[in-house]
Amino acid sequence: MTMSTAISEPRQGQRGSVRDFIEFREFATPSLLVLTWVLGALIITLGSLLTLFGYGNADANPVGGIVGFVVGNLIWRVWIEVLVVLFRIYGALQTIGRALTTDRRD
């Protein structure tokens, strides 16, 4: 099997195998997106709180902290949603490809 056929031809009945992962039929990224979103949101929130309260000194910036919290988390959420949509489109295209392949065999 060549690399181009390994990537383009889905196998029937063995979803989620190590071979699928190695041959790039199964992606690790969709399952890691939730963890990535949580870690990113925590980092943005922590940075906003540090800005809000001034890193423990007199450099507090309440407006910057609140704006950073709201806008930062909103932009981060939208970016993760864009990635989720791309992976769902890919999954839908795989389903369509499988359906077309089985229709040709019948």
Image (tube, helix red, strand yellow):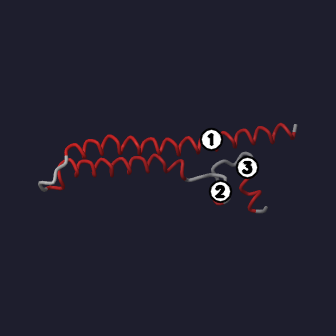
Name the foreground residue: 56 vs 102: 56
- The image quarter containing residue 13 is top right
Camera-nearest label, 1 or 2: 1
Q: Which amino acid type is marked by label 2?
A: Phe
* Residue plotted at (65% across, 56% down): 24
Residue placed most toward the observer, 47 or 7: 47
**Image x and y of residue 58, in percent:** 11, 54
Q: Position of residue 27 (x, y in %)?
A: 59, 52
Image position of 57 with respect to 105: above or below: below
Q: Who comes first in sequence, dot 1 or dot 2?
A: 2
Position of residue 15 in the picture relative to residue 5 (left or right) = left
Q: Earlier in the sequence, mark 3 or mark 2?
A: 3
Q: Is residue 91 left or right of residue 4?
A: left
- Residue ID for mark 3: 10
**Residue to which mark 2 is pinned:** 24
In the rendered image, which quarter is residue 99 located in?
top right
> Which residue sits furthest bottom?
2
SS of the residue under disc 3 = loop
Query: Which SS class for mark 2?
Result: loop
Taking the image as shown, residue 14 lies to the left or right of residue 53, namely right
Under mark 3, the amino acid is Pro
Residue 69: assigned label: none
**Kind of residue indicated by mark 1:** Ile
In which quadrant is the C terminus drawn? top right
The residue identified by callout 1 is: 89
Residue at the extreme right of the image, as rendered: 106
